[in-house]
Amino acid sequence: MPDPGFDISFLVHIYLILILAYAIMIMSSYLILAYLSARELREYLKRNSFVDYEVMLSSEYAPAMSLIAPAYNEAATIKENVRSLLSLNYSNYQVIVVNDGSKDDSMEVLISNYDLIPAEFTYSEQIETKKIKGVYVSRNAAFKKLVVVDKENGGKADALNVGLNIAANPYVVCIDVDCILDKDSLLKLAKPFLESHGKRVIATGGVVRIANQCVIVDGRLVEVHIPDKMLPRIQVLEYLRAFLLGRMAWERLDGLLLISGAFGAFDKEIAILAGGYNTKTVGEDMELVVRMRRYMLENKQPYTVSYIPDPLCWTEAPESADIFKKQRSRWMRGTIETLQIHRKMFMNPKYKLLGMVSVPYWTFFEFLAPFIEFAGIVITIVFVVLGLLNWHHFLLLLLFVYCFAVTFSILALYTEERTYHKYRKRTDFAKMIVAALVEPIYFHPLTVLSALKGYIEKIRGKKSWGEMTRKGFNKPS
């Protein structure tokens, strides 16, 4: 029996204070990151306002780059996607398509359309991978940049490691084969490597945007539209916040932990010395960046990780709740695995800002946030059932959090409008405002649910990616 002198309403009061304190901590971190991002973005745009990227095309100092594109069951679109990669506006690069044991006729499509023949190639396995079946090059001089590797299925990380082993150039660009790249993507991505002074640039990331409802012609983005469906539309908003108001700040602090697996460039030597992609995690993109940074710190080598705010890569976002939940649960599993593998870095001054700020931030506000939110919902329901909740205070708190979320999303939209202004129609802006109003009620709970699913899958030991069915890009009628 509870002590009759004990006032349980005191616990409810403490609970509401703790929720408010946690919410303020998250909101404060978002505002600080947004402020730093705004400063960095302004300086970036000022620095690059008079840059003539065409000069780099004729420069003998332009970094030589190898594009690595893993492909699995991509027969329906692989011809157009590879053609797009071969037509980028850059002079010194090769395209390595790694067929990861596709069960469809991806290899047959590539062989017939690009006139491929087996190459006499000495394969140096610096990183251990699944067996290579063959390496192919084209007899057509128009496709001289193309190298195709056929291998046993081993997953995306294993395919990328094959690309690292084969790449002839000092810098590698790892991309998803079904992504659409801006024609000047490599020019802009190469610039940080070219400009590095004192510190070695070991990786560079670029902005990824949502291509749903956009018009694609011959592998080129020709019209940008806001998605009609609410789920991908809200993801447009989410990507704007993450890339424009988040990663720019981490780049300024030199504490960036994640470069999107859809599009990122790496110093091949450091990537190989660090061990390449980890095939035992579904978050191989984040894990490699953390491990490369850890390698440089432990070997006391000055380095940095750069980030380009220009929209360089366009990808398809999930349009169904089921596919979305699979994607986000996998992202959560990848985050858990990366933090677990590199737990030594947590609050460890040896790893400087990375150990004292970046890793703790990801732990408290990315990994633990969904669990804390879910626990808060459960406790709230218990208090409601017991009639202990102060509805006045609770609803005020809820309104405060909702207003902040909407305002922060509108800030991301404003930043996009003042910088790259890709969504030019007034109706597009109106659609995004509606998305900002709907997101906290619909999208955020779905994200928390997906993260909880990721927790459960991790506990159960799930290793696979899960099927990510794509609808395909729009084409003009």
Image (cartoon, helix red, strand yellow):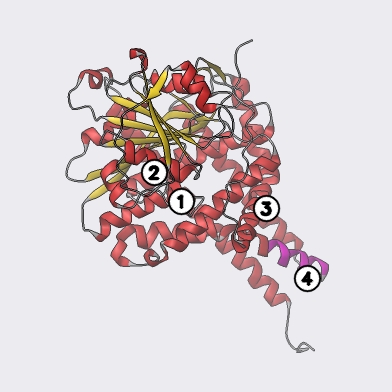
Q: Kindly report the distance in space between the C-alpha atoms of the residues bearing marks 4 and 1.
A: 49 Å
Q: Position of residue 222 (x, y in %)?
A: 51, 15
Q: Kindly report the distance in space between the C-alpha atoms of the residues bearing marks 3 and 2.
A: 33 Å
Q: Earlier in the sequence, mark 1 or mark 3?
A: 1
- Is any part of residue 149 visible from this angle? yes
Dividing the picture into quarters, in which one does residue 40 lie?
top left
Q: Work out which residue is located at the far top of the displayed protein and give it.
A: 477
Q: Residue tagged by mark 1? A: 279
The residue under label 4 is which amino acid type?
A: Leu
Mark 4: which secondary structure? loop
Write down the region rendered in magenta. Answer: 376-385
- Asked if the residue at tag 2 contacts the one at tag 1, i.e. Cβ–Cβ closer than 8 Å, the answer is yes
The residue under label 1 is which amino acid type?
A: Thr
The residue under label 3 is which amino acid type?
A: Leu
Dot 1 crowding, Cα within 10 Å, few <14, some 14–19, many 20+: some
Q: Earlier in the sequence, mark 1 or mark 2?
A: 2
- Asked if the residue at tag 1 contacts the one at tag 4, i.e. Cβ–Cβ closer than 8 Å, the answer is no
Q: Residue tagged by mark 3? A: 449
Q: Comparing marks 4 and 2, which lies closer to the viewer?
A: 2
Q: Position of residue 409 (x, y in %)?
A: 56, 39
Mark 3: which secondary structure? helix
- Is any part of residue 248 visible from this angle? no
* Quadrant of the rendering where the N terminus is positioned: bottom right
- Identify which residue is drawn at 45% across, 23% down: 82
Q: Earlier in the sequence, mark 4 or mark 2?
A: 2
Q: Which mark is residue 161?
A: 2
Residue 141 versus residue 286 in the image, above or below: above
- Identify which residue is drawn at 59% across, 30% down: 104
Residue 165 versus residue 341 in the image, above or below: above
The residue under label 2 is which amino acid type?
A: Asn
